[in-house]
Amino acid sequence: MPRKKKQEPREILIETAVAAMNDKKCRNPVIIDFAGLKGTVCDDFVICHGDSRTQVEAIADHVIEEVKKITGLNPCHKEGFENAEWILIDYFDVIIHIFQEERRRFYNIEQLWADARIIKVDTQE
């Protein structure tokens, strides 16, 4: 019987964040994997958007809560809760971006980092 590959802490963090995003019905989640790129600020971005300020706040709060529950980690920095157009949650190696749709289109981070590997995540509808 083959053994399951042990997950890295970073992988557990990403998996937990994506599951928490999906719990709150996020839109178009993606992971940007910076492996192999030089000069990046972290290893991965996890990005999604919500349909309203309330949903964006709910997604962000749930991500923080679930990551803490599963991994024991608290974010080293978080910002954007004032207007909830773009909330950033920083876990050093993984940075989570939760946008309102209009802001996500405007900043277009996926295009900005198009040389990285972009992984589209299936949502549970």
Image (spheres, rainbow, N blue to C red):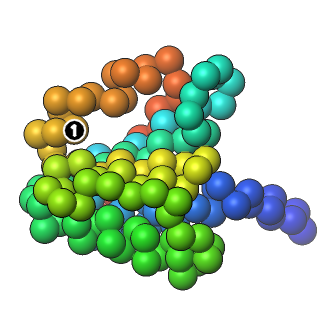
Residue underneath mark 1: 104
The residue lying at 47 percent from left, 42 percent from top is 45
Where residue 70 sits in the image (x, y, percent)?
A: 58, 77
- Residue that sits furthest to the right in the current view: 1
Q: Is residue 34 visible?
A: yes
Looking at the rendered structure, the secondary structure element under dot 1 is helix
How far across and down, in percent of the image, does residue 85 sit? 17, 50
Q: Is residue 42 left or right of residue 103?
A: right
Instruction: Pick out the residue farthest to the bottom.
Output: 69
User: Quick check: 92 left or right of 110?
Assistant: right
Q: Which residue does the image show at 49% across and 36% down from the upper left?
A: 32
- Assign the N terminus to one quadrant of the image: bottom right
- Amino acid type, residue under disc 1 in the picture: Arg
Residue drawn at point x = 61 percent, y = 47 percent: 93
Q: Is residue 35 above or below residue 75?
A: above
Q: Residue 79: percent from the left, percent from the top?
A: 32, 55
Q: Nearer the viewer, residue 60 or 114?
A: 60
